Image (spheres, rainbow, N blue to C red):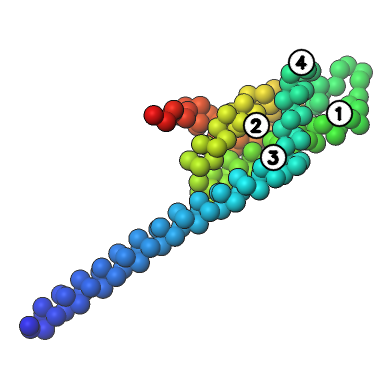
Amino acid sequence: MDSTAIQIISNVIVLFGVIVAICTIIYNIRTAKKTQTANFLFESRQDKEYLESLHLLRRIHRSGKSFRAYVFPCEGGVITEEEMTERRKFQYILNFYERVAVSIREGIYDERMIKRTSFTTVVTTYDIAEPLIKAIREDTQSKTAYQEFEWLVKRWKARPLEKDV
């Protein structure tokens, strides 16, 4: 073999090594992302404040009480201490899903895994809380309050889960 052939073989071997290294890095990133998502899903199921806030949001929704009343009390009225406690719980659940949406959008969490495990909960929670979100935006004069949560729900509604066959 001449030196040119040896040089070509050497370059091919180096190129192959680089390709293997890149594939390994991509695989490890995907695995780490899925592991982090699985940890998040497990931990969120253990989060008592999350569960209490979610149940409270649904209970108030079923009661028919206006979520706007938590931001804008009736004329001459004030928000009671109990309502402030409930409002903090609502904000907890909204902030929770805002962080989830940001983490998905930034590629920190695996969207497909979260969508498969939480699609109905996320979409239903947003639909229930939308009047509250609109009232908060109105009160704070901010169109961006909970915009990432809204982005995620719109994205998922545009491409809902499909039934496995």
Q: x, y (%) of residue 40?
A: 61, 48
Q: Which residue type does callout 4 highlight?
A: Gly
* Circle 3 or circle 4, nearest the eye: 4
Q: Residue at label 4?
A: 64
Answer with the quarter of the image where residue 125 lies: top right
Answer with the quarter of the image where residue 79 lies: top right
Image disc number at residue 72: none
The residue at the point 81 percent across, 26 percent down is 70
Of callouts 3 and 4, the N-terminal one: 4
Image disc number at residue 143: 2
* Circle 2 or circle 3, nearest the eye: 3
Q: Name the secondary structure under disc 4.
A: loop
Q: x, y (%) of residue 69?
A: 81, 21
Q: Residue furthest front?
A: 165
Q: Residue at label 3?
A: 95
The residue at the point 60 percent across, 32 percent down is 122
The residue at the point 76 percent across, 15 percent down is 64
Instruction: Characterize the local packing of mark 4: few (<14), some (14-19) or many (20 or more) Cα atoms within 10 angstroms.
Output: few
Of callouts 2 and 4, the N-terminal one: 4
Instruction: Characterize the local packing of mark 3: few (<14), some (14-19) or many (20 or more) Cα atoms within 10 angstroms.
Output: some
Instruction: Characterize the local packing of mark 2: few (<14), some (14-19) or many (20 or more) Cα atoms within 10 angstroms.
Output: few
Q: Name the secondary structure under disc 1.
A: helix
Marks 2 and 4 sit apart, C-alpha to C-alpha, by: 26 Å
